[in-house]
Image (cartoon, rainbow, N blue to C red):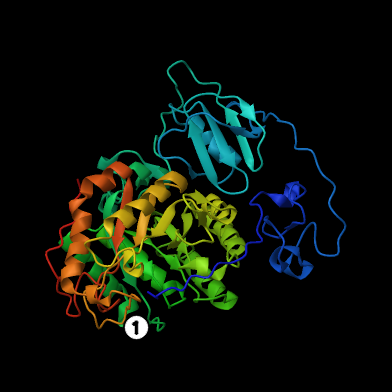
């Protein structure tokens, strides 16, 4: 955790469209990067960086007409170029590997009458009706035909966002367990967005770069997971700042998650600034676990989603095309991708609305990991008795603008004035009384999180990982009677 000095970046990114096939002709002065984004900086316009059209020194592109809707000859219905604006089924969008996968998901869901697919990404929206077609970039859509009058299409899953709508049998919020055998359908395994609310689990720092260190071992991780589950009924473990960039750490986490029936959210962390070398090391290490002979088959059922970087708003737009490229690699395993940061940064939003860059980040993300940090807003929240209005304002922004499921991935308060986590003002509130008040406010507002369908993590599990922030002290004893029940 770092005290952040916010710097407003001048944004040059202008569109998240699939410019590789459609060009940037609608955006004056823009170039198309190798990753399919329109922009006007060197990352987009230099041929040395892989620019594909509108590049510096190249003639202006000729405007092109959007393609007319086309039909796909199969027995599921049409595939058109464009969007459909009808009402979504609950918990959309969900992951689809390609346009035909999205179409098949609709056909195999008795409640779905039409669908739309993000052809620039992997999001799939299932819809209840059969609305008309409209022109749109980065969209393909269709209506379903060929079912019998009873919706006969082999049933289907009504869940979304890679999840099952039924809490009773889904993972990890419900009763689904690896002890009952190897799951074989990720879309039916994980709980849907409407079940991802309330206390989810803990941030779990892994900041020792020695991959052979005890903190990175299966025994230590599994022991801590078992304790989280026994004491607090934790469902998720959110990895924080992993410094080991070898597949071994993810293998240990997958095995521990499997053995303790807990989902894992890895973090791809490289550095506090641009560092391609560490970034690619981190990416390749995680991708290696899906190919591992021992745990590769189970990894997509333990790893719920992946968080790309930490506090990336401080790095401008450097990382966005790289995140897009990594998403394409990750999508073959069906695993969702997001980034984790404070969404109150000027780079992402203007008041209660997203800026263009914020929309691009949200469009690229499959779900939301948001930092809501009253602790680091001391003038608005001088102590833990006054933070709730600020916290609610950030939740309201997220539910209005960002994708579900929504997880407050990082929020904290220090119990120790000597912990090193200075606030910049009102440091007198760094004490046990405020720590207890902060987390008791969360448990006292269980119904609020349920009604808003927002989940939250405690940052962090133990003071040994994040001094002062831990729910456990340095001796792994609870600091107070924290009781995050599910309502």
Q: Is residue 177 left or right of residue 296?
A: left
- Report whether residue 60 is seen: yes
Report the quarter where the N terminus lies.
Answer: bottom left
Q: Position of residue 353 (x, y in %)?
A: 50, 49
x then y, percent, for residue 182: 34, 51
- Answer left or right for 452 relative to 48: left
Q: Residue furthest top?
A: 149
Residue of label 1: 213
Q: What count of labels does the image hold?
A: 1
Q: Secondary structure at mark 1?
A: loop
Query: Crowdedness of circle 1 by 10 Å Cα count: few (<14), some, many (20+)?
Result: few
Q: On the picture, is 125 further left or further right than 208?
A: right
Q: Is residue 358 above or below residue 134?
A: below
Q: Nearer the viewer, residue 27 or 230?
A: 27
What residue is shown at x 40% (from left), y 63% (from top)?
295
The residue lying furthest to the left in this view is 481
Q: Is 393 placed above or below 240 here?
A: above
351 lies left or right of 360: left
The quadrant of the picture occupied by the C terminus is top left
Where is residue 357 drawn, in percent x and y? 58, 56
Q: Is residue 233 visible?
A: no
The one nearer the camera, 2 or 221, is: 2
Would you identify the image quadrant in which residue 376 lies? Answer: bottom left
Measured along the vertical axis of the image, is residue 113 above or below residue 7?
Answer: above
Residue at left 19%, top 74%? 431
Q: Residue lying farthest front?
A: 379
Viewer-side residue, 148 vs 466:
466
At a point 20% along the width and 80% down the height, the residue shown is 474
Q: Nearer the viewer, residue 466 or 434?
A: 434
In the rendered image, which quarter is residue 79 located in? top right
Which x, y percent locates residue 419?
27, 81
């Amino acid at each position: 955790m770092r005290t952040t000095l916010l710097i407003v970046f001048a944004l040059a990114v202008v569109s998240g469209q699939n410019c590789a096939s459609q060009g940037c002709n609608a955006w004056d002065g823009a170039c198309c990067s190798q990753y399919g984004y329109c922009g006007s900086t060197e990352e987009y316009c230099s041929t040395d960086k892989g620019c594909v059209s509108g590049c510096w020194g190249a003639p202006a592109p000729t405007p092109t007409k959007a393609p007319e809707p086309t039909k796909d000859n199969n027995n599921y219905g049409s595939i058109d170029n464009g969007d459909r604006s009808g009402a979504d089924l609950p918990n959309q969008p969900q992951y689809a590997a390609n346009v035909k996968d999205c179409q098949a998901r609709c056909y195999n869901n008795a409640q779905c009458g039409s669908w739309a697919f993000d052809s620039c990404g992997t999001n799939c929206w299932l819809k209840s009706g059969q609305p008309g077609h409209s022109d749109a970039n980065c969209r393909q859509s269709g209506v379903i035909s060929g079912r019998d009058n009873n919706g006969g299409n082999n049933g289907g899953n009504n869940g979304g966002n890679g999840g099952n709508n039924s809490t009773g049998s889904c993972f990890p919020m419900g009763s689904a367990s690896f002890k009952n055998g190897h799951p074989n359908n990720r879309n039916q395994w994980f709980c849907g967005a409407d079940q991802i609310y309330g206390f989810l689990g803990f941030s779990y720092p892994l900041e020792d770069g020695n991959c052979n260190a005890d903190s990175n071992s299966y025994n230590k991780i599994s022991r801590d997971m078992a304790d989280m589950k026994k004491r607090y009924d934790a469902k998720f473990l959110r990895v924080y700042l992993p410094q080991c960039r070898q597949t071994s750490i993810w293998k240990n986490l997958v095995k521990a998650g499997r053995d303790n029936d807990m989902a894992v959210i890895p973090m791809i962390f490289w550095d506090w600034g641009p560092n391609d070398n560490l970034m690619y090391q981190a990416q390749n290490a995680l991708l290696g676990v899906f190919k591992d002979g021992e745990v590769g088959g189970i990894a997509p059922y333990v790893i719920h989603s992946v968080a790309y970087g930490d506090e990336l708003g401080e790095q401008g737009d450097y990382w966005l095309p790289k995140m897009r490229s990594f998403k394409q690699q990750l999508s073959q395993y069906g695993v969702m991708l997001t980034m984790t940061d404070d969404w109150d940064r000027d780079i992402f939003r203007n008041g209660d609305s997203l800026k263009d860059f914020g929309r691009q980040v949200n469009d690229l993300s499959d779900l939301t990991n948001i930092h809501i940090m009253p602790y680091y807003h001391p003038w608005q929240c001088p102590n833990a008795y006054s933070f709730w209005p600020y916290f609610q304002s950030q939740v309201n922004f997220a539910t209005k603008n960002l994708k579900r499921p929504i997880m407050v991935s990082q929020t904290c308060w220090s119990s120790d004035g000597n912990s090193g986590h200075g606030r910049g003002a009102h440091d007198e509130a760094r004490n046990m009384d405020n720590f207890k008040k902060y987390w008791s406010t969360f448990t006292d507002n269980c119904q609020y999180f349920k009604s808003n369908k927002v989940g939250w993590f405690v940052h962090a599990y133990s003071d040994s990982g994040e001094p002062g922030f831990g729910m456990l002290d340095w001796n792994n004893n609870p600091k107070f009677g924290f009781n995050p029940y599910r309502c």
